[in-house]
Structure formats: structure tokens, C-alpha cells
Image (cartoon, coloured by chain):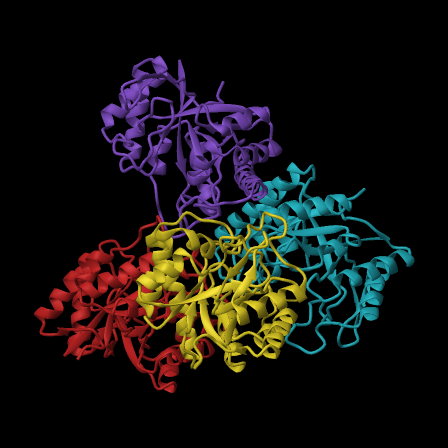
Chain colours: A cyan, B purple, C red, D yellow
Amino acid sequence: MRIDLNADVGESFGAYAIGHDPGLMTSITSANVAAGFHAGDPSVLRSTIRLAKAHGVAVGAHPGFPDLAGFGRRDMKVSPREAEDFVLYQIAAVAGVAAAEGVTLQHVKPHGALFNMAMRDADLASAIARATAAFSPDLMLFGLPDSELLQAGRAERLRVVAEAFADRAYEADGSLVSRSKSGAVIHDVSAVVARAVRMAKDGTVTAIDGTVLKLRPDTICVHSDTPGADDLAARLRAALGDAGVSVRAIGAA
Amino acid sequence: MRIDLNADVGESFGAYAIGHDPGLMTSITSANVAAGFHAGDPSVLRSTIRLAKAHGVAVGAHPGFPDLAGFGRRDMKVSPREAEDFVLYQIAAVAGVAAAEGVTLQHVKPHGALFNMAMRDADLASAIARATAAFSPDLMLFGLPDSELLQAGRAERLRVVAEAFADRAYEADGSLVSRSKSGAVIHDVSAVVARAVRMAKDGTVTAIDGTVLKLRPDTICVHSDTPGADDLAARLRAALGDAGVSVRAIGAA
Amino acid sequence: MRIDLNADVGESFGAYAIGHDPGLMTSITSANVAAGFHAGDPSVLRSTIRLAKAHGVAVGAHPGFPDLAGFGRRDMKVSPREAEDFVLYQIAAVAGVAAAEGVTLQHVKPHGALFNMAMRDADLASAIARATAAFSPDLMLFGLPDSELLQAGRAERLRVVAEAFADRAYEADGSLVSRSKSGAVIHDVSAVVARAVRMAKDGTVTAIDGTVLKLRPDTICVHSDTPGADDLAARLRAALGDAGVSVRAIGAA
Amino acid sequence: MRIDLNADVGESFGAYAIGHDPGLMTSITSANVAAGFHAGDPSVLRSTIRLAKAHGVAVGAHPGFPDLAGFGRRDMKVSPREAEDFVLYQIAAVAGVAAAEGVTLQHVKPHGALFNMAMRDADLASAIARATAAFSPDLMLFGLPDSELLQAGRAERLRVVAEAFADRAYEADGSLVSRSKSGAVIHDVSAVVARAVRMAKDGTVTAIDGTVLKLRPDTICVHSDTPGADDLAARLRAALGDAGVSVRAIGAA
């Protein structure tokens, strides 16, 4: 029994600070580092990689839409060619800065609207997988278990990593309950922790209608924009440890 | 006797086309490829690298100030830390996209105001050299022969590449005549070609006051924003060949 | 019988020149001036307004998505609140610079993907109409005759202006043939001119299936990104004049 | 005896929150509202103007360099023409959004590096004053008492407003002590309050070398990026009131 804990980091920009990076880094095992398109800047990127390295946290690229004003959360209708090229660019930037710090890039996880769209849009998913594989066949690709993205990753012979969200409700079919519905986000910290432990240990989660779903995540996402995200991550890590689950980066031995 | 011919390319952006890339690529031997800060975008970057590869042109990164509106031509007072980080980021992006296309980055040449400032500002020069060396000790650094930039490059144990401008007038001390003075830019194509041949063959150039300067450039820059830059490059290459000068990328065997 | 001729102008950006503004200004009667979000910059905006004023061309704001890299041509899923605020901002910028040049803003025409989405999306259309009315109840709103945008404009008690495209094929229901279909754009200049004259004079156009549609446009759009757009505009204006149609800005007496 | 209290507001951007706007608005009398170039966005701009209106705070435009990554704090070598055009654009945007909210723009105060450079650079100062006057001769221009900016404002027949900084040390010649020197910023709140009261009441301040300077400010700036800026503003306002100084917007009757 092992699990990876991932979170989005490096999203500050210039004079603008956001997130809980120092706190999160003491608990997570994989960091999704912003690349300057939806968030982040070259100095934030570099210091975030240094911080991850100092805490032994694995580094991934977190490419997003070129939409700083919208924090990459607004759907944009880009062509597969555009997506492939800007994802490759962002992977290259994060990987190159990481390499200069002596860190090998572990994975790629798309951000925000790009992530959500790539779960369902086969062409977009394929573009992202191609960009990832073009950069390196050793990169892992993060996404929801039955998503177009992971399917595209497999087609590119990438190692795919199934992700779960302990603070999000699931539909009976394994998809996430839309944020527009009530109950979509679970705010009770104890409940979130209990769900994470059950996901990691038993491979199950109770859907919003009461159905018990099988779910074998390789990694659990801690939303870094939740107030108290760093405390939540610390509690998750402690509870998983107490339950006998080994919390390690997905790429660790 | 050998010489490299370099030019700035990949400066188009989205719907905006600029430059003479396809024409230039048939004559130059080293391409300075924009990285998306002063010019260029991820798709332009990738297709420019493909074009360079198809023509056997060596690829370099051309980092600039984060100033698309000013095309990187406006002095910006950035800290050495900021400069180091955004130069590293830009090198990483170009190098990573090049690697995905099977191309190894040859060199780094700063753009516009960043280039000009780095000729004289030791702290900025050192920041750029550090970023370059941090990315790879095999990268070459382009600059004016007696500049702070090349001195900083040597301090970082990088191979430095002395650059000359065939279409710019020189002062008696070897510096370029300021563009604000009349006669700073030489518009007569035959004169530019003759100067280039003499630089490459004899290692001399006549300064604006008549003094004959010693100048042993490794590479000659063709300004890509001059009207007819592609024709000029073709004439330069032909004339150099006729004069028995081998025109090859600086990093070629 | 009178008609307005409009075109998109002021889309250059920094070192990047695009379009045929000087040529177009001698023929069109209403200019849609970019506001710096999808294209244009403060200096281009101001000089474009001066050019319009010098030629007696009426000035309108041409707000677009905040997507310079995509030239405002990519759908973005923005909230009505965001759209209302960035359209108001762009109208304010163009109107204020125009006022400093002694020119009163005549109209608002959304650009690219924002225009296309606002034809069909009632919430977005309403946001644009509210922003326009909030700035001034005297502004006119340009759009396709039966669009959500013009309906929203009427609801805000704005004067709405029905637009036609002489170089685009129409479906039998009066909508434009999608650019993805063959025959969507009419490239033959004589055919385009003949269609424009017929639209202005007879109020009809032949749809792609042969149906004769009624169409009473107040203004005809000349696509400024077509090669030879300035020549086409000149021929349109001359032909309309020869046919006895008065070509005047929609807001002119 | 009366004084204006001003602060920079509206500097949040998209998902990035910064500053203490709601708290400051209960104490200041003039708000310098960011225009989207160094900080701010169209939605932040509009809601900031609404907030100012709700609190009876006068609204000014706070134009800055086009440098969001540097928060407008980095010197940029722009031409006077560029500066004039982007300042006019920013004034237009703020004024137009304010007008849509029923608020008339009171003043213009340049931001950050643009402000500092305009204190000493006559060409830049003149460009800013021209842009301000071109928009409206009724706008006031804020700056240091003996600055090039206020001189340029007078030359354009604008009403100029002398500004003082209660939390900054002064040199004997009336200039601000450079932030690079120790003692440049006064952190003791009681001392700052006492200085402000003395400035407003007696028109004097003690320079860093002990000299007593005459200083008759029309407005005192509260730095909004100081931690506790809102509390400081509240204490300043209360202390000024207690001392019998009327705290009113500079443009109020």
C-alpha cells in the first residue's frame, strides 16, 4: 500500500503571492509547478523547484492555458496544434529550470480548464500526450482514471498516473460531481481525511448517491487554493501514515 | 579561414508575421531563435527550429526582456536575479523544444536592449553567463569582442564567440557607433559585403574616423529586420565563399 | 438609398504591422478600432484615430477577448460579468483617446470570437449591450440582423446597426455559411462588388442554395485581413456610388 | 487647515488579491486606481471605483509602465511619445469606467517607476502632463512639490497637487531619502502620524540631518503595500481630525 500526494504550487506572480507552498512542501510528495502561462514567473518557478528539492518533493510541469487574467480556469478553444506546442514549451521551461537545479522532471499534469477539457476531449488529450512524449518518454502523465488524457497517454506509451480527489464528491459513474451542484466539494476536514485513507487503503469511495465505487488512485490531489490547504495536507499525510499507507512520490523507488 | 553567419529569427507572434526567416535560413549558419518574451510564441518557436534543422542551421536561444510591446528594445532596470531567472527560463524553453525536434542547442545570444546593456553592465552580463552555464557548460555565448558579456562568459568557463556587424560603423576603440549618430548604419549592400569579406579574411575593419581596426570575429550578424535581409545574407554568403572563406556554424566540426 | 462601409483597423502592435489601414481609410466610412486586448496598442490606437479623423471616417470601438496570442479569434468561456467589464474598459479606452483627438465615438462592434459568440449567446450579448449602454446611450451597436446581440442592444434602447458581409456566403435562413464549409468565402472581387451593390440597392442576396434572401443592411463589412482589402474597399465604394447608393457613415446626417 | 489623504488601490489582478482596499477606503479621501498595465484588471477597476464611490472617496487614475511582472516598479526607457500614449490610454480607461459609474475623474498620479522617473525627467514629465491635459484640462496632477512633473503640469495649465510622504525620510533639499539608505522608511506608526499632523498643521518636517524643512503638502500618501496600511490610514485620519485639520479630497469644495 502506497500513495502519492500532489498539489499545485509555484502559482505566485511578480508582486502577487498566492498559495501555501512552504507549508504544502512538508507534506506532499509530488509538486505540479506552474510554468508562467496561467500563473508563475521565471523567478517563482526556480525558487519553487529549489523548495521542492530541499523537501525531497518530486517535480512535475503544470502547463495551463495562456490566460494569466483568468488563472487558466476559462475554457479556450485552441487547436490541437496550438495546445501541443504550448504544452511542449511549458514542459521544456519547467524541465530545463529543474535540470539546472539538478532535478529531473517526473511528470506532467495539465492545469485548470486545460485539465478539465483534456479529460473529455480526445484531440486535446492527444495533443498533450504527444507534447509530453516528444519531450521525454520517461515523463508520467497525471489525470482522472478513465479520462481521454490517460488513454492518450497510454497510446503514446507514457506511464499514466490515476488521480483522485479526496475533497470532491463522485458520481456513481466515477466522474466528479460538477462544482455547480451542491455537495460537490467536501469541506469537512475529517471527512476528507477519512475518504483519502479509504481510497488509498481499500480502493473505494462512496459516491454522492451512496454507491460504493472502486477507485485505485496512484495519487491524491490536495487543492492548494483551499484555505488551510497546508494543514489539510499535513493531516492527510499523518493519517495515511497511521493507517499503514506509505506516502511516496509516484516515481520514487 | 572560416566564419559563422548569424541572424535573429522566430520573431513572428500569433497572427503577426515579421522577418524573412525562410529566405535567411538558406544563407545563415546559426539562428538566434526568440523565446516568447520579446517576440515569438510556442508554435513559431517550434516551426522555426524545424526550419533551421531542415536547412542544417545551428540553433541558439535569443532571450530578451519581457516586453512584447517594445520588442525587447527598451532598456529595463531588472535585478541580476530577475535577469538570471528569465534568461534561464528562455534558454530552457528553446533548448527543450529543440531537443524534442532532435536538435541540440548551440549558443545563447541576448536580444536587443538586453544585449546592449549586457555589453557594458558587468552584473547583468554575469547574470546572463550564470544562467547559460547553469543550463549547460557546453553552450556558447555570443557578444561583442571586448564586452562585459564575453568576459563574464569566460569567468563561467563558457566558450565565447566574438561577433561583428558588417552593416554597422565602428568607433576607433572598437565599439559600435551609436545609432543616434549619422553614418551608424551602412545601407550600401556592396559596402556591407566588402566589409564582411575583409573582416573574415583579413581580420580588419575601417572605423568611422579612418582608423584600421583589428577585429577577428567568429560570427557576423545579419540584421533580420533590414528590408532585403534575406538577399543581403545570400550575397554575403556567396561573396565569402568566393573569397575562400568557409562559412560554417561556429559549433560545426 | 444609403449604406455604411466598415472595416477593422488599428490592429498593429508594437513592432508588428498588420492590415491595410491607410488604404482602407480612403474608402470606408466607419472604422472599428482595436483596443489593445486582441490587437492594437496605445500608440497604434491614437494614430489610427487621427488617421480616421483626417479622412472623415467615423470611429467605433472594437473590443475583443484578452487574447493577443490568438488575435481574439479563439472562443473563451468568460462570465457575463467579466465580459461586461472588459468590454466597458475597451470602449472607455477607445472613446477617451478619441475624445482627446476631438472625435466622438460612434459605435461598438465586438471582434472575432467575441462577435461570433455574441451572435448566439444571449447572456454574452446582454453583457456587451449593458457595457455599451453604461458607457453611453448614444452609442450604436453593430451585429448580424437577427442576432442575440442586436436583440440585447434593443433591450438596452441602443440604436442597433444591421451588418452584412459581401464576401461571405449565406445560408437560406440568413446565417453565414460556416468557414469550415467550402464556398463560405467569396474570393472573386467582381462577385463581391456585385453582391454588395445588390444588398444596398435591392436589399437582397442569393443564398448558397439559390434562395433569394431579403437583407436590408445598414452597413457592409470589408474584411481587413483579406489580401487586397484596400483595393476591394475602393472598388466597393466606387461601384456603390455608380449605382446611386450614398456611402456615408451610419451616424452621419 | 485641510489635507487630502491618498493611497494606491485596485491593484489586485484576476485570482491575485493584493492590498487593503476595503479598509483604506474608510479613511482616505483620494484613491489612485490602477489601470491594468502595472496592476489591476477591468473587473477590479470597476469594483474599486464602486467601492470608492460608496465611501465618498475621490477617484484618480494611476497609470504605470506596461510591466505587470514587475508591478511597474522597474525603470523602462520608453520614448515620450510612447509614454504620452499609454498614459492617455490608461486615463481614458479609468475615467470612462468611472463615468459609467457616475463618477468624474479627479486626478492623475503616475505609479512606481513611472512616478519616480517623472519627478526628474523633464521629457517624461511633459509627456505625462500632455496626456493628462489632452484628456481634460480639469484633471489635477499629483507629484512631489519641486518635481519636473508638477512643473510640466503647470506648463499645461493643470492644477498641480503637492504630495508628501509621512512614512519617508527627507533629505535637507526636500527630496526623499533613497530607499537604498538606512532610515529611508519610517516604520514607527506613532512617528508617522506625528509627522503627518505636523506637515498638515505647521507645514514642516524634520529632514534626516535634523534640518527643519518647509513643506506645504496638499495631499499625504499612505503606502498601500505596507502591512497594516489600513490601520495606519485610520490612525492618520483620526489624529489629523483631532488636531483640527479637515481631511477632505483635494477636489472637494
Can residue A203 be seen here? The reply is no
x and y percentages locating residue C148 in the rendered image: 39, 79
**Residue A237 image-quadrant placement:** bottom right
Residue C155 vertical position relative to residue A58 in the rendered view, above or below: below
From the top left corner, tell me how far across and down residue B217 is, in percent.
41, 20
Left or right of B79 on screen, residue C133: left
Image position, residue C152 (x, y; %): 39, 82
Report the number of numbered marks. Answer: 0
Q: Is residue A207 left or right of residue B116?
A: right
Frontmost residue, D167 versus A212: D167
Left or right of B73 on screen, residue A117? right
How far from the left and from the top, in percent, is residue C118? 41, 73
Residue situated furthest front in the rendering: D211
Say which quadrant the N terminus of chain B sits in.
top left
Q: Residue at x 22, y 74 (%)?
A: C205
Q: Identify which residue, D187 or D43, lies in the foreground.
A: D187
Compared to residue C233, the image places residue B97 above or below, namely: above
Task: Using the image, determine if residue C49 lies above or below residue A105.
Answer: below
Instruction: Tell me if residue D50 comes above or below residue D207 in the rendering.
Output: below
Residue D159 seen anywhere in this rendered image of the structure: yes
Residue drawn where x is 73% and y is 71% of the image: A169
